[in-house]
Image (tube, grey):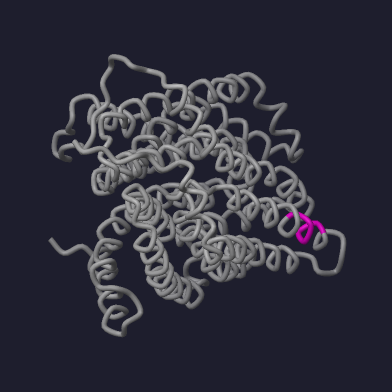
Amino acid sequence: MFNPFSSSFLWVANRLANRGLIDKKRGERIVDLSWPRTLTMFSRFSQRTVDVSMIGLTVGSAGVAGIAIATIYWRLAVGISAGLAGGTISQVAQLFGGGSNDRIDLAVKQCIFIGTLFMSPFFFGYLLFTEELIQLVVTDASTVQYAVEYLQIQAIAVFFIHINLVGSRTLAGADDTHLTMYIRASGAVLNVILNVTFIFGLGMGVTGAALGTVLAEAFVMVLFVIGFIYGRVPLVGDFPVTVSMTGPYFSKDMSSNLIRMASPLMARSVSRSASNFPLFAILALFSPTVVAAFEVGRRLRNLMNASGRGFSMAGSSLVGQELGQGNEQEATNYGKDILTFSFFIYAITATFVIIFAPQIARFFAEHPDEVADIIPFVRVAAISAIGYSLSESWTGILKGAGDNSWVLYAQLVSKYLILVPITYLGSITTLGVFGVYIAFILEAWAIAAITYYRFSSGKWIIVNRVYRPTPTND
């Protein structure tokens, strides 16, 4: 069956290989791992973008702004899960590459258990103190109402998403991103169907959008659980690794390594999410329409970054496996080829979005003034997406080596020294919204510059030697 993602990726890889820019065999392995993850993330980000599109067309800017404010709280919790899962992929990839498959079971169970403990306070906080939390950021009555509706329903999903993140990262670390693609894509399709039914069919608005997401994430979680326990999911395929329900459940050394590797990633996610609180408080000073337009730009940037997530996952897995076998030079070669390959994909995507920005904006609003506000954010998002996606590629390589501290440094600089200050400068000077455009672009390119510096230094290989497992003979 023709697959547009794999075919287009393979076409680009072959063109680059013919010109001597990347190695052909490495390019094929990169394609094999990156396109399923790209499709998976495209499905996930599409469903989130469709949420905003449907709410923008039915409820308006206030509804989109409400979802945006609720989402910054929700991402605070999910960021912790993503950090832990990022540590897990490094462990799993190195154990898988080093032939220690029997220890993968324990690595997965520990991550799920630790993550569940971390998620519990967020769940209860979002459920019991929703309105108070929302009003810390925004005071507009309509925006607060929609944000409260969305966050209260989304609270339960933090547990589902944690398991889903660990599941997808574990499969990627075991050199299989196809299964996650099928499972995630199924969830995305279900989410869109539910949203159309709830939002357009039943007129449930923001509540319908939240409920559709929760039910879709629960469905995905059930499929992952079935696959890891029984070794396969009907109509999807066999899992390369399984997780038993029996012990052992804890290893001090593995837990310590997980926390050590995941802590910078969790701190990165928390720092990124925490910066959204002052950011959106500042954006709210402009108007709910600007908040909504900014959120549309962010969602589109994430959608364009689907390929970045794919290359990031490929980098973590391939680099981690080569390092697990002690092949440091080959790990470096994979890193360089991933960067070259990914840049061309990012540039092509951004060019398309810039050209068709007016048409894209009309999917998120009907009123001409709201469309006019969204168009420049679409173009700015495309320029920002190139830097943002490049940083994903470099971050994936560093994750595969377990060198996550510089990822945190990049996040802190981009958010707190660039994005928030420049946005605030726009709110108090004649720069106005133009200041937001500048901040949106520079934030992404700052992360790219810092992570590139760390990769080019080669010190990530030295850091990895601390975590590297000893290969076994079985």
Instruction: Name the residue: 52% across, 49% down.
Output: 463
Which sits in the foreground, 337 or 150? 337
Mainly helix, strand or loop, the magenta region? helix
Q: Is residue 460 magenta?
A: no
Residue 462 shown left or right of residue 182 in the figure:
right
Is 412 displayed left or right of 314 in the figure? right
Q: Going by the picture, which residue comes out furthest to the right?
A: 429
- The residue positioned 51% from the left and 47% from the top of the image is 55
Name the side, left or right, on which 66 lies relative to 470.
Answer: right
Residue 223 on image: x %, y %: 26, 31
Seen at 79% across and 65% down, the residue is 432
Name the quadrant containing residue 445. Answer: bottom right
Quarter placement of the C terminus:
top left
Residue 190 visible in rendering: no
From the viewer's side, name the closer residue of 63 and 229: 229
* Residue 419, x across and y down, in percent: 71, 58
Q: Position of residue 406 (x, y in %)?
A: 60, 53
The N terminus: image quadrant? bottom left
**Magenta part of the chain:** 420-424
